[in-house]
Amino acid sequence: MHRRTLIKLAGGLLMSTTAPLQVRAEAYRRVRPGEAGWPTDAQWKELGGQIGGRLVTVPRPLEACRADPKGADCANLFRSLKNPWAIGDSAALTQTSGWADAWVSTPSAYAVRAQSAADVAAAVNFARAHRLRVAVKGGGHSYQGTSNAPDSLLIWTRAMDRIELHDAFVAQGCTSAPQPAVSLGAGVVWLNAYAAVTKAGRYVQGGGCTTVGVAGLIQSGGFGSFSKRYGMAAASLIEAEVVTADGAVRIANACTSPDLFWALKGGGGGSFGVITRLTFRTHDVPDWIGGANGRIEADGDASYAALVAQALRHYRDRLCNPHWGEQMEFHGNRHLDISMLFQGLTDKEALAAWQPFLDWVAARPAYTWVKPFWLKAMPARYFWDLSFYQKHGLDFVVPDDRPGAPAYRMVWAGDKEQVGTYIHAYTSAWLPSRLLQEANVDTLATAIIEASRELGFALHFNKGLFGASAETLARTRDTAMNPEVLDAFALAIIANGGPAVFEGLPGAHRDDVKAQQGEEATRKSYARLIQVAPGAGAYVSESDFFQKDYRKAYWGSNVPRLTAAKQKYDPEGVFTVRNGIA
């Protein structure tokens, strides 16, 4: 373990509570194979019997390549390492392969292939009794590495994939008016949820990437492409079934265990319990969903500065509203990339929103559309339908190409390149709405340009809620998210990475020099940008593994309330994760 990682981990675990340090140190002590207290074969066998034989040793998937590097099994493995569906179907792999000086994706010692809350409870009880490290994986998308841990017991919820639609749902113990909702098992990924709900003529707010797990997303707060319209996924949560550290299966909602319910809504995954089922309110499905894309090149520094400032003004005046989401990217080679999505607008209405900017660009010979501006809307009910894209010859999506894979499985083409990434550095910061005021726009544009010369980055407009409706803001205010998100117009993400570095992967050696260069560029870019927003908070799911003062950055004024919930529901620290509430 990298020295600064060890120091920070120790500080985070031991200094975040009023309990005596010796008590907390012993509480967080984990038993590893070969040490006294590690379960015997008979004890593991007993656990397997309790859960119907669903305890498995986790194979090292790369063993096939060690045994026969040129064999068919090894070739199939290498193909699967770029397929997010194949990675999700493996107990041994994660969507990100690691982070320089931080972690590398490493299989657990054993995994419980959970099919029910009872299976999860048995695993939690066993881990608590034997002081085992617990890892929980649904989608496996954690950049912080929280869905894997060496020498751990993995609670793998992939098989808990039931989806149930409700016309009139009322949370247990509540007397509120019935409302349309959907219940999702902890192993459901968002593509499956979207497909089922839109088929029924409804919409559920979730994540943008098709293979992200519902449980992990909700515990981080959960941004999606249309967060300015529907709010964060956590804000739509009505009820959760969760197994807490004492092995109890609890129902948490606004009326039953409300403190636990609130903590699950953005308080960080893996800290308060293991979610087994979630119920979300659903919304009327919009008529249209569409996208707007293009790349503009400026012919000089002055013209690029004018372009960036104009793009910010245009976003402020025409796009900072519930219809629009996603991002613009800024590059040191004087490129501006537009990658936006919209909902609830026709082609004509969406184009009208962009026309002033298009006219501004067209009137100035300093700019060239390297990738021509493109805008198109489609019926929203087909947005997550692979067959629709294939029928119309659209290449926005990539199917799961494994033999026998379900025909509906797809991933956005732009997301596939992220699969297996070995992160060199990753930072994020919420940018406050005051930066869009006319007196500040040029200053913000200068910061963006100078930061992008160190390393290009994106502003994710859907990951800040300034411009959302009063109702959306009110629901988000009732989550554990840092209140800064309510006034942020965007989340800036500055990151760098390289090819996969899975444990034991032949021929995939870490390039430490390149990783260090990437980290330095990321930190310089971040440092310049943050000058216009000193002390800005960060999004827990998309942030620095070495985040300074992470509690304040992730949760702001909500930290004391989260700490109280942690001490109530997990006083012994059965659940520990990187940068989590302890």
Image (cartoon, rainbow, N blue to C red):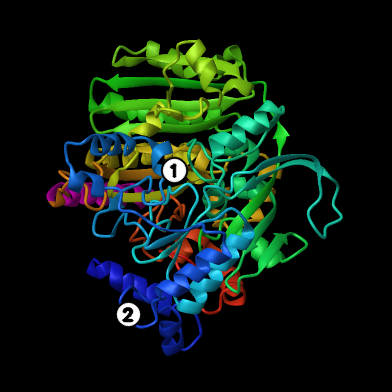
Q: Is residue 37 visible?
A: yes
Residue stretch rendered in magenta on the structure? 513-532
Q: Is residue 519 above or below residue 165?
A: below
Q: Which mark is residue 35?
A: 2
**How far apart, in angstroms, are the residues tagged by discs 1 and 2?**
31 Å
Evaluate if marks 1 and 2 touch, with contact meaning CB atoms under 8 Å apart. Answer: no
- Name the main secondary structure of what is drawn in magenta: helix
Relative image position of residue 15 (x, y in whole percent):
42, 79
Q: Which mark is residue 386?
A: none
Which residue occupies the foreground of this view, 127 or 258?
A: 127
Residue that numbered label 1 is attached to: 89
Q: Identify which residue is drawn at 51% across, 22% down.
A: 386
Q: Identify which residue is drawn at 36% across, 26% down.
A: 337
Q: Earlier in the sequence, mark 1 or mark 2?
A: 2
Q: Is residue 489 above or below residue 339?
A: below
Relative image position of residue 446 (x, y in whole percent):
32, 38
